[in-house]
Image (cartoon, helix red, strand yellow):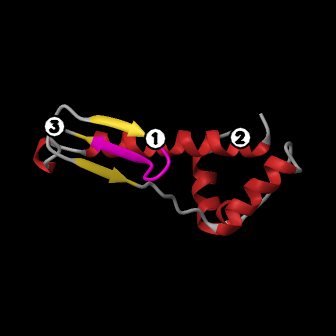
């Protein structure tokens, strides 16, 4: 599988995870009647069909640009390297993680 195919597979996986999270959060009072047929496609990403209506759903994600660049470098050039970014170098995060490390 080439890099673009791998990216498409990752995108599809994340889209399905997002929709699963949405479905898990829905309650009977949210007005989505059952049964519902969920079709995964391109535009929109999903179509929810019930007996009386169809709802198109386009998923999206937000990723910090610096984190995205670091992940790209790790995927394409430095597979075995740790690449620091704003998330991993954040002082508050480091302090929180120190508290999670096992005592020696």
Q: Using the numbered discs, state the Cα–Cα distance from disc 1 to disc 2 in whole angstroms.
A: 18 Å
At label 3, counting other C-alpha atoms closer than 10 Å, the crowd grade (few under 14, some 14-19, many 20 or more) is few
- Sequence-wise, the earlier of marks 1 and 2 is 2
Tell me, for residue 51, which label it has, or none. 3
Which is more foreground, mark 1 or mark 2? 2
Which is more foreground, mark 1 or mark 3? 3
- Residue 1 is drawn in which quadrant? top right
**Label 3: which secondary element:** loop
**Label 2: which secondary element:** helix
Q: Which residues are magenta?
A: 41-48
In the picture provided, is 103 more to the left or to the right than 33? right
- Residue 46 is drawn in which quadrant? top left
Residue at point 64%, 44% (across, down):
8
Tell me, for residue 40, which label it has, or none. none
How far from the left and from the top, in percent, is residue 96?
57, 57
At label 1, counting other C-alpha atoms closer than 10 Å, the crowd grade (few under 14, some 14-19, many 20 or more) is few
How many numbered markers are drawn?
A: 3
Q: Tell me the residue that label 1 is attached to.
A: 17
Is residue 102 visible to the viewer in this orientation of the structure? no
Relative to 68, does residue 52 appear above or below in the rendering? above
Relative to 86, does residue 53 appear above or below in the rendering? above
Q: Is residue 82 magenta?
A: no
Q: Using the numbered discs, state the Cα–Cα distance from disc 3 to disc 2 in whole angstroms.
A: 35 Å
Q: Tell me the residue that label 2 is attached to.
A: 5
Where is the C terminus found, in terms of image quarters?
top right
How far from the left and from the top, in percent, is residue 9?
63, 39
Residue at point 89%, 50% (across, down):
77
């Amino acid at each position: 599988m080439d890099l673009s195919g791998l990216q498409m597979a990752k995108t599809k996986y994340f889209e399905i995870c997002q929709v699963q999270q949405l479905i898990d959060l829905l309650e009977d009072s949210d007005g989505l009647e059952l049964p519902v047929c969920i079709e995964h496609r391109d535009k929109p990403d999903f179509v929810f069909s019930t007996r009386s209506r169809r709802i198109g759903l386009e998923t999206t994600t937000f990723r910090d640009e610096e984190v995205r660049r670091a992940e790209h470098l790790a995927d394409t050039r430095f597979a075995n390297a740790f690449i620091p970014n704003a998330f991993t170098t954040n002082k508050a995060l480091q302090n929180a993680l120190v508290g999670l490390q096992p005592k020696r």
